[in-house]
Amino acid sequence: MSSSTDRGGSFVSVAHGVAWRNLHNHFSHPMYYIPSLVFPLLFFTAFTGALGALTDLPGFEFEAGYEGFQYVFVLIQSAAFGGVFTGFAIARDFETGFARRLLLAAPNRQGIIAGYALAALGRWVFTALVVTGVAFAAGMTMPGGVGVAGLYALALLVNGAGILFASGVAMRMRTVQAGPLMQTPVFLALFLAPVYVPLAVLDGWIETVARFNPFTAFLEAGRGFLVGRPTTVGLAFGLAVALLVLFGWWAHRGLRSAESAG
Amino acid sequence: MREFVRQVAVLGRRSIMRTLRQPASIVPSLLFPLILLAVNTGGLRGATNLEGFPTDSFLDFALGFAFLQGAVFATVNSGTDLARDIQTGFMNRLALTPVRGVALIFGQLAGVAVLALLQAVVFLGAGLAAGASVRAGVSGALVILILSFLVSVAFAGAGALLAVRTGSGEAIQGLFPLVFATLFLSSMNMPRNLIDADWFRVIATINPVSYLIEGIRSLILEGWNVEALALGFGVVFVILVVGIGGAVLALRSRLARV
């Protein structure tokens, strides 16, 4: 009994320590937090500013306007990339030797992954607050009311999946040069979903790819929450949980790989 | 003059070899613009149904952007390479030699120039293979290659200026999102006359990147549009002078021989 309490306590203390350090480093250096803010804000500004005319296309119906349509994409994108950017921090910790010392010192190594995941969550919450403020300032409305909580719950799961995927890569490669391996698949999956127009308006090869892309379910469900007409909710949450489990296993194996590398 | 040419040649060979030995610099700068081109062409195909859209092929419309995105990589690559030379002390050792600052900058840009040429040929070839066509014909395609090459070298000059001013590779990498932002806040995805939001149309109009994209785009969509080409070449000339001239001036203090 006391042994399991010790394990639980050490897990929490390791997770807390890793998360605090990562968040402190992140918010102390503009060069770390500015890119994670710039990209979603840039996408939001550029897409809503330049592409608003797309709402005139036949079949494009969205009650929250193009600002709302893009807000959901940007929120999901920032959640996924919040995880990926935290993966960069893990890789950097391995390059500087900090992660190896952490592996030696931590009484519960699973707490390390949990700590980085908590840090990714904290980083994303900050980004999401800024993005949401900008979206409201740009005139976004939320016809879905409190139902929009579903969108944030979904984004939170995507953030978790993002950090578990990135930490699996970072712990195997243990170098910042693995950045493209973390970033590119997520970037591709995001942009091969209905980013600019709804799925119903897409055609050609990208429509076929988008149909089988999990991010399509996230975006469709998120947009449904925003306007108060939930759609593909079960599929979206089911896929998000499945990705969490899959990447949780991937991160766990990554930790084992880092441990055996010494 | 002969000595100047020799200095540029030696430093240029070093720069080209360094570029060619870094696949991590070459591959993303070729791959990412093509990926974004494919994704945008698929996702924004519906935009061609908007009234007044200048073509029924979004690939033709978007192809010009690939060249500009390649130029952003040139900025970062040249800046990072030069900043590394400053950080590692290579510049300090050069200061002990009679090498001239202007030769150093020209030599430094040689690697980017080779990469820019490769990018231009690959992007145009990929676009044509995917079904794009150049309204201005073969000579128009040649002008696209020249303009795109000059854009990359001009952006690389701006990267060199930033590198000399900051002396930090990390600072150059940190500027990447800001340079990338200038691309997105332009007419890259929509003709300026079809942009609904007034504020965005104003930003796109004062953003020089719009004129670089529109210069290349005009050859693909319209044929020979003298105004668009004059603006495109004019803007690239200004960036070349400011970037390379500024880098040479800033280098004087870096290469201070005391």
Image (cartoon, coloured by chain):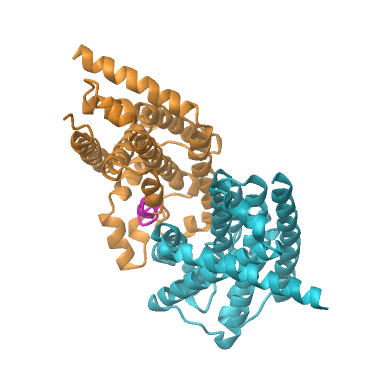
**Count of marks placed on residues:** 0
- The N terminus of chain A: image quadrant: bottom right
Q: Is residue B75 visible?
A: yes
**Chain drawn orange in the picture:** B
- Asked if residue B185 lies in the magenta stretch, the reply is yes
In the image, taking residue A169 as reference, residue B148 lies left or right, namely: left
Percent across and percent down for residue B182 are 35, 53
Q: Residue at horizontal 65%, vertical 80%?
A: A230
Q: Residue at horizontal 55%, vertical 34%?
A: B129
Percent across and percent down for residue A72 are 54, 71
Q: Is residue A198 visible?
A: no
In the image, taking residue A234 as reference, residue B55 lies left or right, namely: left
Q: Give the extent of the magenta segment.
A: B178-188
Which residue occupies the extreme top position in the image? Answer: B2
Residue closer to the observer: B183 or A254: A254
Hey, which quadrant is residue B168 in on the image?
top left
Chain A colour as displayed: cyan
Residue closer to the observer: A169 or B29: A169
Which residue occupies the extreme bottom position in the image? Answer: A146
**Vertical comparison of A185 with A109: above or below:** above
Hey, which quadrant is residue B228 in on the image?
top left
Percent across and percent down for residue A22 are 53, 63
**Vertical comparison of B2 with A33: above or below:** above
Hey, which quadrant is residue A12 in on the image?
bottom right
In the image, taking residue B230 as reference, residue A34 lies left or right, namely: right
- Asked if residue A172 lies in the magenta stretch, the reply is no
**Vertical comparison of B58 with A111: above or below:** above
Percent across and percent down for residue A91 are 58, 51
